[in-house]
Amino acid sequence: MIEIKNISKKFGKLEVLKNVSASCNSGQCIALIGPNGCGKTTLIKSILGMVIPDSGSMEFNQKSIFGDYLYREKIGYMPQIGRYPDTMTIGEIIEMVKKIRNSKDNLDEDLFRDFEIEKMLNKQMRTLSGGTTQKISAVLAFMFNPDVLILDEPTAGLDPLAAEVLKEKIIKEKGKGKLILITSHLLSELDDLISEIIFMQEGKIFFHKKVNELKEETQEDKISKAIAKILRAN
């Protein structure tokens, strides 16, 4: 689905991505993790077309994304911090995005219903808590039935019930054969979700493994403990 080949990127003298390659396939839920400054955000922005790599190639469904933009219609993106016009209401934001996307497909309104967004459509964005803003970002990411979901710290700021609702939705969409990429610092929340892990360090992919292989190699049941054991060994 997404094929990344030898991607490198510098900002001035700082080399943020160093010859990164990875294959991300349909039906997988992949955690993209690593310490701050390791290159995760730049890699995500490269996939979204927001950053243009200095070298390498990137394909979406076997077609280069460079010079293209239509592939983005197949991606739902949930940012870590959603930024919306302060004076617009929730309802106005949702309607605006619907018009921009101009999707002819049936809308996925599961999260709209589960988060009871209809009860707060007239609230202005500037009045919302961080958790409610996060719910709006989640609703918009899933609404247009994308083939790929990129979720940046998706449960950050959500209350426990809302986080559980979102995790159940992620599992449901993975079951439909979608590719889901998740960045998170809360490794404990990933155990029930992910099938693969890409761990980055200093602009490189340190390892890309299936979760069951990782646990088998380390003899650990928890993802966080398995990763810690690999890092200590290296």
Image (tube, grey):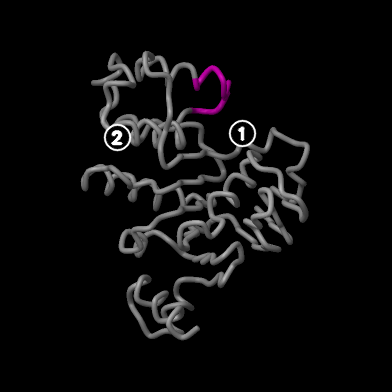
Establish if 197 lies above or below 121: below
Q: Residue at x 54, y 49 (%)?
A: 41
Q: Which residue is mark 2?
A: 130
Q: Determine whether the residue tagged by mark 1 lies in a helix, strand or loop.
A: helix
Q: Residue at x 33, y 49 (%)?
A: 168
In percent of width and height, residue 62 lies at: 75, 51
Establish if 116 lies above or below 154: above
Quadrant assignment, res 88: top left
Q: Nearer the viewer, residue 196 or 58?
A: 58
Magenta extent = 97-106
Q: Nearer the viewer, residue 80 or 99?
A: 80
Count of marks, rendered view? 2
| Numbered tag placed on residue 121 in the rendering | none
Q: Which residue is mark 1?
A: 73
Q: Which of the two marks, 2 or 1, is nearer to us in this view?
A: 2
Q: Nearer the viewer, residue 166 or 11?
A: 11
In percent of width and height, residue 21 lies at: 68, 63
Q: Determine whether the residue tagged by mark 2 lies in a helix, strand or loop.
A: helix
Residue type at mark 2: give it: Gly
Instruction: Identify the residue at the far front of this view.
Output: 13
Residue 122 lies left or right of residue 30; in this view the side is: left
In percent of width and height, residue 221 lies at: 33, 77
Residue 145 lies left or right of residue 186; in this view the side is: right
Q: Nearer the viewer, residue 40 or 179?
A: 40
Q: Is residue 101 magenta?
A: yes
